[in-house]
Amino acid sequence: MNNGIRLNKALAFAGVCSRRKADDLISAGAVCVNGIVADALGQRIDPATDTITVQGKLVLLPSDCLEDQRSYTYVMLHKPIQVVSTVRDPQGRPAVLDFLSEELRRRTRLYPIGRLDYFSEGLLLLTDDGELTNRLTHPRYHLPKRYQVRVRERVENRMLEIMQKGMTLREGECLAPVEVEVQENTTLLLTLRQGINRQIRRMCRDLGLTILSLRRISLGPLCLGNLPKGRCRLLLPDEVSALKKSVGL
């Protein structure tokens, strides 16, 4: 079958397991297609007509599988401050979709992956690729996120040591060690690998640092570069491949 999608990808879509684990199940003879044991790792199936079972249990394939062969859209936005990281805002504030071209908004339904808070700016991804979104938002695949943070006060060495060792927030949450550099005494370059809500703002609060600006400059293999505030661009094919590879796709 030249059309359809790979069996391991269909199982991943359905939430049964990862693609790698799906290959293990296929190799073990635990997966059947239309009642016949699947015996090829590269086997392709038609989600609209084929029946899949794993260890005798029926697998319900989501509608996303039927759309797998269409091309997805991947957009990098330089989110300005005072913009919400949602499709729309009940309070009428500017939302990230407001910065996309009319053509992008009309031809596909893009959603932001993750968030940047209202007063933060920088790199934000939007896509209609559900599988990639699930991977990027899953705790298992926290990609390193790099931020440039300008503060009012001079950054002391003791503050760097606390962040590098892993600090405990006022609310009691324990943080993993953070990679940190200082530029010109009042600008921090922080690399985070956790998904704690408003982590940088709460860290600076507890260290007595006043944030003047906070910008995300990279996410995994992607870099914001010189993309102007409020502007967006499509990801290059190599960037899409690198992003998918970083989360095991």
Image: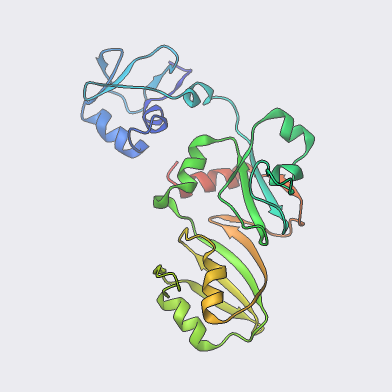
For the N terminus, give its image quadrant: top left
Vertical comparison of 79 with 210: above or below: above
For the C terminus, give its image quadrant: top left
Please state the horizontal and vertical placement of residue 6, each as a whole percent of the image. 41, 26
Vertical comparison of 183 with 106: above or below: below
By what rule are the colours in the image chosen? rainbow
Position of 178 with respect to 102 (left or right) is: left
90 or 185: nearer the viewer? 90
> What residue is drawn where x is 47% and y is 61%?
196
Vertical comparison of 75 with 172: above or below: above
Please state the horizontal and vertical placement of residue 119, each as a whole percent of the image. 68, 62
> What residue is drawn where x is 37% and y is 25%?
7
Position of 176 with respect to 73 (left or right) is: left
> What residue is drawn where x is 41% and y is 74%?
168
> What residue is drawn where x is 66% and y is 57%?
118
Vertical comparison of 231 with 53: above or below: below
Please state the horizontal and vertical placement of residue 58, each as a whole percent of the image. 29, 20
204 or 99: nearer the viewer? 204
Q: In this view, which residue lies farthest toward the front?
A: 91
113 or 50: nearer the viewer? 113
Residue 186 location, quadrant: bottom right
Number of numbered discs visible in the structure rendering:
0
